Image: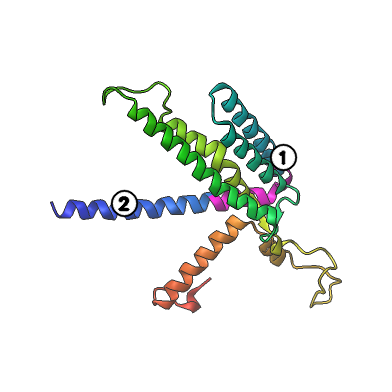
């Protein structure tokens, strides 16, 4: 077969593009919702962080999860909670924010190593290939733990937070060129106050538009 494998590769590329567009659209929509309901979003994220900390503690007590890794996970969520001080704004050079980014990667690595080692040890103790150890978590359980206890809060913060360089200016903080007594244009202020996820999507869209203009797919004067 020669054509069918090519069709498979083409379908995979198209499917990946559609999935990427769906994720970008979802991020954009969630960022819009958070911008309009920041107080509700802050309450929801705070309760979510505390709930996950309780869940990790229960997993350690009931399901015998490692104490050291559980302590690291709970400490990480305490650090994530510190980013709620100036919600929804965050300074990208803030040590607390940078520590949160590092802790996301560290938690992903240590829990991945833990589950991989646990699974490898369980397979080594099997008497037959068709046996299934009772204490080995399934792929669904592992993926659910990563999604809820490792990725959910950092991903939610990424969607919700806005860079401090984009903080909305207050009335009278900047002189108005039109002499309106310090009133700031609402449209410009809204653009400066957009979330990080929304800004990322806009930057990617702008880069794609600039690239298409360079190769002649879209003329600069045709832009909206």
Q: Please, what is the dominant secondary structure of the magenta stretch?
A: helix
Is residue 148 one of those drawn in magenta?
A: no
Q: Residue at x 84, y 70 (%)?
A: 182
Q: Answer with mark 2 or mark 1, whichever residue precedes in sequence.
A: 2
> The magenta stretch spans which residues?
27-41
| Residue highlighted by disc 1 | 43
Disc 2 to disc 1, how far (Cα)?
40 Å
Residue 155 picture location, percent across and down: 57, 47
- Asked which colour scheme the image uses, the reply is rainbow
Residue 73 picture location, percent across and down: 60, 38
Q: Residue at x 49, y 45 (%)?
A: 109
Disc 2 element: helix
- 4 displayed left or right of 193: left
Q: Is residue 99 above or below residue 74?
A: below
| Residue highlighted by disc 2 | 12
Residue 203 picture location, percent across and down: 54, 65
Badge 2 local density, few (<14 within 10 Å), some, or many (20+)?
A: few
Q: Residue at x 62, y 35 (%)?
A: 71
Residue 115, quarter of the rendered image: top left
Disc 1 element: helix
Q: Nearer the viewer, residue 196 or 53?
A: 53
Which residue in the rendered view is the most extreme toward the left? 1
- 212 displayed left or right of 125: right
Is residue 36 one of those drawn in magenta?
A: yes
Badge 1 local density, few (<14 within 10 Å), some, or many (20+)?
A: few
Labelled pair 2, 1 in contact (Cβ < 8 Å): no
- 36 displayed left or right of 155: right
């Amino acid at each position: 077969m020669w054509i069918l494998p090519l069709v498979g590769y083409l379908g995979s590329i198209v499917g990946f593009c559609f999935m990427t567009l769906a994720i970008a659209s979802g991020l954009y929509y969630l960022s819009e919702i958070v911008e309009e309901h920041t107080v509700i979003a802050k309450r929801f994220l705070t309760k979510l962080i505390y709930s996950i900390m309780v869940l990790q503690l229960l997993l350690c007590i009931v399901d015998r999860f490692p104490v050291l890794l559980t302590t690291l996970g709970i400490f990480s969520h305490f650090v994530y909670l510190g980013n709620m001080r100036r919600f929804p704004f965050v300074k990208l050079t803030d040590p607390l924010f940078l520590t949160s980014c590092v802790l996301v990667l560290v938690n992903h690595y240590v829990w991945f190593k833990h589950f991989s080692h646990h699974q490898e040890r369980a397979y080594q103790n099997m008497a037959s290939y068709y046996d299934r150890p009772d204490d080995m978590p399934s792929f669904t359980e592992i993926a659910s733990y990563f999604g809820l206890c490792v990725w959910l809060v950092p991903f939610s913060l990424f969607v919700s937070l806005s860079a401090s360089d984009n903080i909305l200016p207050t009335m009278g903080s900047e002189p108005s060129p039109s002499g309106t007594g310090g009133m700031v244009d609402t449209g410009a202020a809204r653009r400066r106050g957009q979330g990080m996820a929304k800004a990322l999507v806009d930057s990617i869209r702008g880069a794609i538009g600039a690239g298409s203009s360079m190769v002649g797919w879209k003329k600069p004067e045709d832009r909206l």
